[in-house]
Image (tube, grey):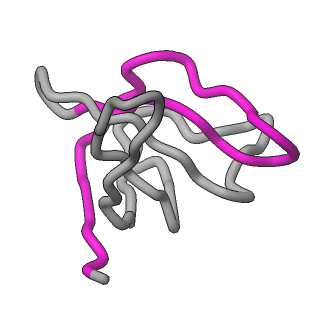
Amino acid sequence: EPLWAGRELTWANPPREVGEGHLKAQLKRGSYALEAIGFGLFKEDLPKAPLEALFHLRRDRFRGRETIKMHLKELRGTS
């Protein structure tokens, strides 16, 4: 499974915690945004944009709708 890197990313919407300690957000670069999930990556002091991320891209099917999601492995601020 390829591991991708993204740079100069920003929060498209405020990140939130789902479950216990999991990060859910939308990350964007320019006008393009993707849903992102980071298992075990939520913390109160999340980095400020611009961000760098390592992630896998995965197809997600929910209620008959198919989307592509970023499965975050690492996330950090670059400022």
Compared across the picture, whether 46 is left or right of 57 comes to: right
Relative vertical location of residue 31 with respect to residue 45 in this rendering, above or below: above
Quick check: is 38 in the magenta stretch?
no
Residue at the spot x=31%, y=83% of the render?
1
The residue most toward the right is: 20
The residue most toward the top is: 13
Q: Which residues are magenta?
A: 2-28
Residue at the spot x=59%, y=53% of the render?
38
Compared across the picture, whether 33 is left or right of 61 comes to: left
Q: Position of residue 44 (x, y in %)?
A: 79, 35
- Closest to the observer, 39 or 8: 39
Compared across the picture, whether 34 is left or right of 44 comes to: left
* Residue 33, image quadrant: top left
Q: Position of residue 41 (x, y in %)?
A: 68, 54
Quick check: is 9 in the magenta stretch?
yes
Residue at the spot x=81%, y=48% of the render?
21
The residue most toward the left is: 31
Q: Position of residue 36 (x, y in %)?
A: 45, 42
Q: Position of residue 49 (x, y in %)?
A: 41, 33
- Closest to the observer, 16 or 50: 16
